[in-house]
Amino acid sequence: MSKYIIVNADDFGYNAEQTRAIRELYRDGRITSTSLMAVAPGAEDAARIAREEKIPVGVHLTINSDSEAQRWQSRTRGRSLSDDRGLRCSQIQVALHARRREVAVELEAQYAFLIGNGCCVDHADNHCGTLYGINGRRFYWEAYRFCARHDLPYRFPKSPAFIERQLRGRVPGLVYRLHRHIVSVGEQLGVRQLDDLVSNPQSVESIGDYEHLRRWYLDAVDQCADGVTEFFLHPAYPIEGDPGWQKRVWEFQLLRSGDLLQRAQERGIRVISWGEFREMSSIY
């Protein structure tokens, strides 16, 4: 089996700094994919750019906010998804309150927003893992059913290697069983899934500097297994007042350098888009 990677920039529409960075990276051929957040403040602007510049996007399914200070608004105003300020932030609050029926309706509304704005949607993925079962809820059923209805591949890796990387190898046996169960749900519904998934899990404090981040990602390319692996990053221009944002700036620097694509070429790994995966996944 051959090796393929998708280079995806998440959070298109998150804010002006993120949207600008992703737009430039796609124009320059440094990424092959992006994921648009239909509930983010810059969603309308990102959708307009995607339509005008013919940038295919994934629907970045989102049922939580990132910040208590700036709550996002759902597309449906579902009562179980939001309080009077907007979408809840924590996994615990989402798990306690969200109803599966309202989750399903919200996913459809976010997709409809992209289609209604003339976007070409080539895959689906999820913000903060709220639909992956890690909060104790079976929202992955809603995600897979959504993907099956719209014939969209989904960001969930068939290999547990992603979980091992995220948890630094400390994975309880129950997690492996849950992972296998979730993959089987996708298979049962005929949804195409990745073989592996790569994203640096470290905080900006743990990373330390740009060179550490760069080496981590280049090593991850070297270690790619057979099949299709998605690398997803969150590139952005700098903003003030958020030290953690520096990681996104470094990821932008890395993608803009072209080093990730060059390393893939040197290792004989084919770089593809989600659209290509959608067409080839039954035969690769």
Image (spheres, grey):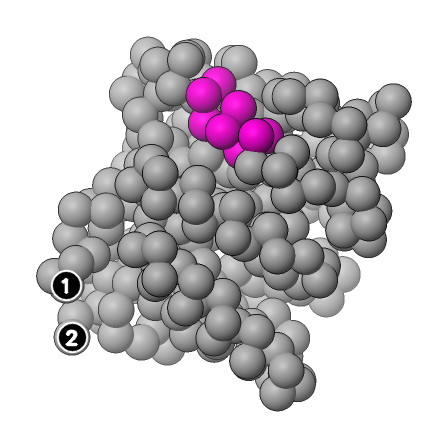
Q: Which mark is residue 1?
A: 2
Query: For this view, does 265 lie left or right of residue 145?
Result: left
| Picture residue at 25% right of the left edge, 69% below the top | 227
Q: Is residue 107 magenta?
A: yes
Task: Tell me where residue 228 appears, x and y as whole percent.
Answer: 29, 63
* Residue matched to label 1: 284
| Image vertical order of residue 12 relative to residue 276, above or below | above
Task: Tell me where residue 87 appears, x and y as whole percent.
Answer: 76, 31
Decide: marks 2, 1 in contact (CB < 8 A)? yes
What is the three-letter code of the residue carrying label 2?
Met
> 126 or 81: nearer the eye?
81
Query: For this view, does 221 lie left or right of residue 164?
Result: left
Most extreme residue toward the bottom, as rendered?
173
Distance between mark 2 and mark 1 Cα atoms: 7 Å
> 216 or 132: nearer the eye?
132
> 173 or 96: nearer the eye?
96
> 231 or 43: nearer the eye?
43
